[in-house]
Image (cartoon, grey):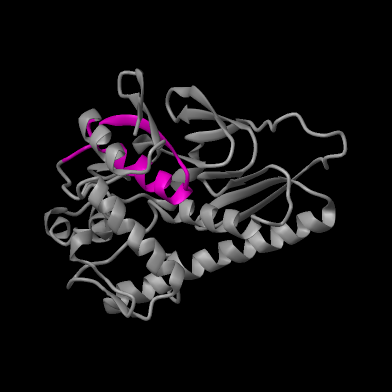
Amino acid sequence: MSINPTRRRFLAITAAAAVTAPAAADRAAPVTWQGFALGAEVRLTLHAPPPLAQQAIAAALAELRRTERLFSLYDPASALSRLNRSGVLLRPPRQFLQLARLCTRMHEATKGVFDPAVQPLWQAMSRGEDPAAAARLAGWHKVTVRKQAIRLAPGQALTFNGIAQGFAADLVRTALTGLGLGPVLIDTGEFAALGGPFRLGLADPDRGLFAARSLTGGAIATSSPAALRLAGGTHILHPDPQRRPLWATVSTEAAGAALADAASTAFCLMSKAEITAALARLPRGTRATLLGLDGSVTTLEG
């Protein structure tokens, strides 16, 4: 599974109406901050007086920059770029190791469909090359994840574009927890909330708005294969290049945005039965909303 970082901004999920619960009369008006990280626009919506809002924005920006230093494919000095060049990352930073372990969990829960080791396949298909040789390099199970080092199999390279935006949202939410803020909505291309409720619209790039969700705490992430196409396929890739997406758009709700991010992308490539089985392996309450290629809408919950 792989994605291009720009696909998050096609508005597969939109904050069509970000509405918090009725507030006390003295609650501060919402403050909105916009920036750019991990190849996409990011937005923070919060209720706080200006000094606290500025503190929260600074904390959020620090976490976003930390995430870029860890997982950017475009920064040659990032931890991920160094791992891809040398095949080994000694003493990986705590957050890098945390994300790698979550990748292992999602790889197992989806029976190998979620696979950050498809970066060579992504590169081959983006160049219009025969993907067969690159596909043989896929397989997260070939990656060794240890506290002392993360090692790739020969020829492998990783992309975390199917999980890093959600992970960034989780890091920001953790950093803001305890600051005494009112409802907060974090949008890194995936949504994570402190309090709420926030009303979010789910949209498909071709069919437009197809559902709405209310988010109070928790997170939600959406993927659509049609957001970007490569030569011979879409930007959401199965480790087996012969397999194609089965859904137009998938939105996943979960406690954490990284888990929702990985699940929404992988579920695009999985049948209803496979998704049902994967949800049973994930935390209770994880829910997927599936927009079929025929326009039908199905909701599955673990």
The answer, for residue 159, to whether it is visible in the render is: no
Magenta region, residue range: 243-271
Task: Locate the C terminus by quadrant.
Answer: top left
The answer, for residue 102, to whether it is visible in the render is: yes
11 vs 52, nearest the viewer: 52
The residue shown at (25%, 38%) is 269
Relative to 27, is 119 on the left or the right? left
Q: Residue 228, how many percent across, how many down?
A: 38, 41
Q: Quadrant of residue 152?
A: bottom left
Relative to 187, is 232 on the left or the right? left
The residue shown at (65%, 36%) is 196
167 vs 205, nearest the viewer: 167
The residue shown at (31%, 78%) is 149
Q: Residue 205, how many percent across, how many down?
A: 44, 30
Q: Quadrant of residue 16?
A: top right
Q: Residue 167, how many percent across, how many down?
A: 47, 55
The residue shown at (31%, 76%) is 85
Q: Residue 56, how many percent across, how many down?
A: 71, 58
